[in-house]
Amino acid sequence: MIIRKITAFEREAVKEFYLALSADDRRKRFCCLLSDETISRYVEGLDFMQHSVLGAFNEHGQLIGLAELAPGAKEGELAFSVRPDMRCRRIGTRLMERILLYARMSGVGKVFVMFLSENMPMRRLAQSAGMTVKMDGAEAYASQELPAPSADEVSRWFLQEAVAHGEYFTVLGIERWGSLVTQPRPTAPKFLSAPNALAV
């Protein structure tokens, strides 16, 4: 699995990922049920310079999970979603680890997650990351103070980012090359037989 920062050029992939979610998954991700139009507007409004989105990709370069960081004046808000058929594989845990590290590298001192109280996977994910979880009726709030990164962590971070991007585009290249290799060879066009072609 490869985790890397999503760029503005991949906005359509993010939109398709969210639109493919079931009604219940949309409700858990956004804490309310959103229509296709509302989700499309949400993704179109993402500012990828300010709003950090990390994507998890499988061995075929397909998007299987997203983690978002929306920095605020004092706190950064996090949000997560994993493709239904890829859950229970620690993808959410890996995304949480990376987005927390990304938040620290971006100078964010505190992060929080808002989610529905019934969303037990999100609650367990927040608790496993060391967040303090508070329940308030149908909603829950988890938060965590983040320490500033050390110089060594910053160096390793830039190296990891470079490796992740390199791995992704290598996988993407292999997938595209493989699809060309496995395509059936085009058949030669059928021409008239020589005698008929020469007939006058």
Image (tube, rainbow, N blue to C red):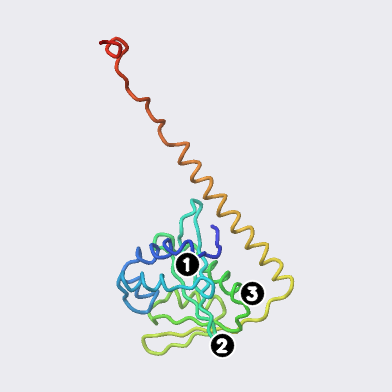
Asked which secondary structure carries label 2, the reply is loop
Circle 3: element type: helix
For marks 2 and 3, give the CA distance: 15 Å
Left or right side of 75 for 136: left
Is 51 in front, or is 132? 51
Q: Quadrant of the N terminus?
A: bottom right
Quadrant where the image shows the C terminus: top left
At 59% across and 58% down in the image, what residue appears? 165
In the picture provided, is 116 more to the left or to the right than 146? left
> How many badges with numbers are in the image?
3
In contact (CB < 8 Å): disc 1 and disc 2: no
Is residue 84 positioned above or below 173 on the image? Answer: below
Q: Which residue is mark 2?
A: 74
189, 21: nearer the viewer: 189
Q: Position of residue 98 (x, y in %)?
A: 58, 69
Residue at the bottom extreme of this rendering: 136
Residue drawn where x is 50% and y is 74% of the image: 125
Q: Quadrant of residue 25?
A: bottom left
For numbered disc 1, what is the local secondary structure? strand
Identity, as a three-letter code, of the amino acid under mark 2: Lys
State the image coordinates of residue 171 (x, y, percent, origin top left). 54, 50
Point out the frontmost of discs 1 and 2.
Answer: 2
- Which residue matches tag 1? 66
Q: Looking at this view, is 199 or 61 the one in front?
A: 199
Amino acid type, callout 3: Met
**Image quadrant where residue 161 sits:** bottom right
Mark 1 neighbour class, 10 Å CA radius: few under 14, some 14 to 19, many 20 or more: many
Q: CA distance from mark 1 to mark 2?
A: 23 Å
The tag on residue 105 is: 3
Cα separation, mark 3 vs mark 1, equals 19 Å
